[in-house]
Image (tube, rainbow, N blue to C red):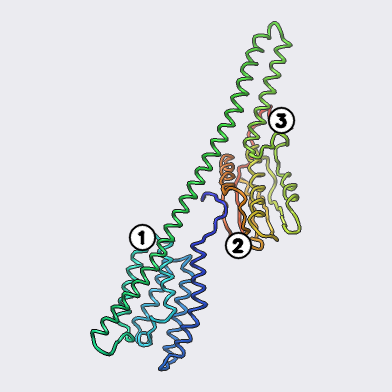
Amino acid sequence: MPPATDRVPHRSADAGLIAAIVALIVLLPVSLAAAATAPPPLDPMTVGLLWSCFVALHAASLVAVRFPVGAFVAASTVMLVLVLAPAARDAAGPLYPSSVAYLLCLGQVAVHRPARLSVPALATGIIGAGAIAVLEPALEAGDSDTDTALLRFGVFLGLAAAVTAAWAIGLLLRVRAARLEEQTRARVERALADERMRISGELHNVVAHAMTVMIAQSEAARLMMPTRPADSARALEVVARTGRDALRGMRTIVAVDGRAPLAPLPTPEALDELVTAVRSPSCDVVLTESGDRRELSAPVALALHNVVREAITNAVRHTIAPIRIDVSLAWGEPLVVEVVDDGGAGPAASDLGGGTGLVGLAERVRLAGGAFHAGPRMPRGWAVRAQLPVGVEPADPADGEVGR
């Protein structure tokens, strides 16, 4: 599954879609009107052909964000029709404003696809610019062949420059997105390393101290047992108490929040209280369960509680109210927990948190033996999903003391 990260807006995709929508709103009506009122008047079949090609170009630019190669192939085919079809060519079809949508498709190929695909797309665009410059009847200068050749060459340079600029802008956006992705990956790896180092260091301190005390008391109890049984019993009580304290400390580290020693181990029943505490007039939280509840080990119970709590917290933090949050538990093998919000009234501008909360949560789920995924859902909102193993290992007798 993909690594979990906090919400990051897809700026490149959003910008491409916005540009395509703006081109559709601004350029398509101009092109349609120009074709319908061109002097001398065009015959209805030619107008219909031009209109169909313009609509197809804009449709391709809209889907280019999701399917850049397919959209570019479709746009290239439409431009080929405008260049080679006699009626469209005589009407200067390739020079209408809607042809800009072709550049948007080319730019999306450069943004979303590697050089082995974007460079041939650039070459296709330059060849198309040459075809327009050579074949377009509207570029006849009328004075001399030299003037016509210079005009066609100038048009070719201008069109080739526009094609190259669209490709270069897309390439720059791709490089920038790759750099941001690399920075995010480095930040995630650093957060994971820091989390593991913190867990390792705290576990070492807790266990090393406890083991030192337990070994010393055990040796003392062994030596005092024949002659001083009462002192030996007290030493063994210290051993047991130290072991319980060490387990409490280890549970604190796993629970992250530092409150585990003062409260019992979270159970599925505790999720009802968690949901009730968050529910308000501006935040509707619904908890649903399917299947029969199963017994969970301590790490899995903690992971379940933390997944629900962190997902609800993120939904409230990053979304403008009112918001609806659905928490669902599907009891089976494995246990599947999903926390989905409806996107509320839109994303909230918040600088709370360090951007790695879901990363640490994913690591906790992985250490508990589960799988974790978080990401945006269509058409809006956010979804967090975790699969956790069910069943528990035979309990250690001391565990009962810890949970009290």
Q: Position of residue 26 (x, y in %)?
A: 50, 78
> What residue appears at the point 55 percent right and 50 percent down from the top-left corner?
5
For mark 3, what is the residue? 400
Cβ atoms at labels 3 and 1 below 8 Å apart:
no
Q: Are marks 1 and 2 in contact (CB under 8 Å)?
A: no
**Quadrant position of the C terminus in the picture:** top right
Q: In the rendered view, would you say 69 is above or below 214? A: below
Where is residue 168, by image quadrant? bottom left
Q: Distance between the Cα atoms at labels 3 and 1?
A: 61 Å
**Mark 2, residue position:** 380
Going from the N terminus, do you reach mark 1 or mark 2 first? 1
Labelled disc at residue 115: 1
Q: CA distance from mark 1 to mark 2?
A: 32 Å
What amino acid is found at the position of numbered circle 2 in the picture? Answer: Arg
Where does residue 359 sit, x and y in percent of width and height? 56, 46
Q: Choose between 360 and 22: the one closer to the eye.
A: 22
* Cα–Cα span, label 2 and label 3: 45 Å
Helix, strand or loop for disc 2: loop
Hey, what amino acid is under mark 1?
Ala
